[in-house]
Image (cartoon, rainbow, N blue to C red):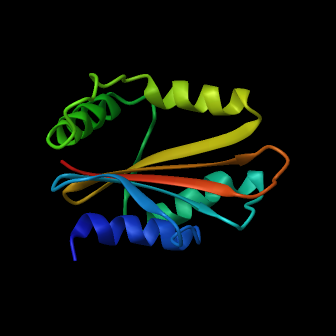
């Protein structure tokens, strides 16, 4: 099994979002999987749950404002372009823009970025601000 699948599988399993999940992008260097869980996660537990899966993955958390994030996005963009010919250049403010857009629709969003040996992992979760299911999960696993 490819390591990207193993890492993404741990994330989707942790959030019980495996059933019905599917890869949005899958090539030799990057895997992006989206899914949804029927479980409701209390909003005040978003950060702690992301920290918990980070520990399970034995990852080191990176701050969203760190310069390392730009490097990760550029590497991920390069990895996506290996198989996708219609992508635009990476938007280094994409995390914040996505979060703002989802929040404007009444959703609560949390994401974290982790480094593990040879891979960067970005995990985003969001759900309705009234804690109505589903909980959406997106995980990106990209080679360094």
Q: Would you identify the image quadrant in which residue 88 lies? A: top left
In this view, 88 is above or below 134: above
Q: Residue furthest right?
A: 130
Q: Nearer the viewer, residue 16 or 47?
A: 16
List x then y, in percent, for residue 32.
36, 52
List x then y, in percent, for residue 131.
81, 53
Q: Residue furthest front?
A: 86
Q: Would you identify the image quadrant in which residue 102 lies? A: top right
List x then y, in percent, for residue 113.
42, 46
Q: Residue at x 71, y 41 (%)?
A: 108
Q: Is residue 129 left or right of residue 86?
A: right
Q: How many marks?
A: 0
Q: Nearer the viewer, residue 72 or 104?
A: 104
Q: Residue at x 23, y 40 (%)?
A: 80
List x then y, in percent, for residue 29.
18, 52
Q: Residue at x 81, y 54 (%)?
A: 132
In this view, 76 is above or below 123: above
Q: Residue at x 67, y 57 (%)?
A: 135
Quarter holding the N terminus?
A: bottom left
Q: Is residue 27 left or right of residue 129?
A: left
Q: Is residue 78 left or right of residue 62?
A: left
């Amino acid at each position: 099994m490819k390591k990207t699948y193993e890492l993404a599988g741990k994330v989707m399993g942790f959030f019980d979002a495996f059933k019905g999940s599917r890869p949005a992008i899958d090539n030799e260097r990057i895997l992006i999987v989206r899914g949804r869980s029927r479980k409701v996660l209390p909003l005040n537990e978003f950060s702690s749950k992301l920290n918990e899966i980070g520990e399970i993955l034995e990852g080191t958390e990176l701050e969203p404002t760190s310069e390392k994030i730009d490097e990760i996005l550029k590497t991920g963009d390069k990895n996506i372009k290996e198989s996708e010919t219609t992508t635009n250049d990476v938007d280094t403010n994409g995390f914040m823009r996505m979060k703002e857009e989802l929040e404007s629709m009444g959703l609560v969003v949390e994401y974290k970025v982790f480094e593990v040996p040879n891979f960067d992992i970005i995990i985003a979760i969001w759900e309705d601000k009234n804690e109505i299911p589903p909980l959406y999960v997106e995980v990106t696993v990209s080679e360094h």
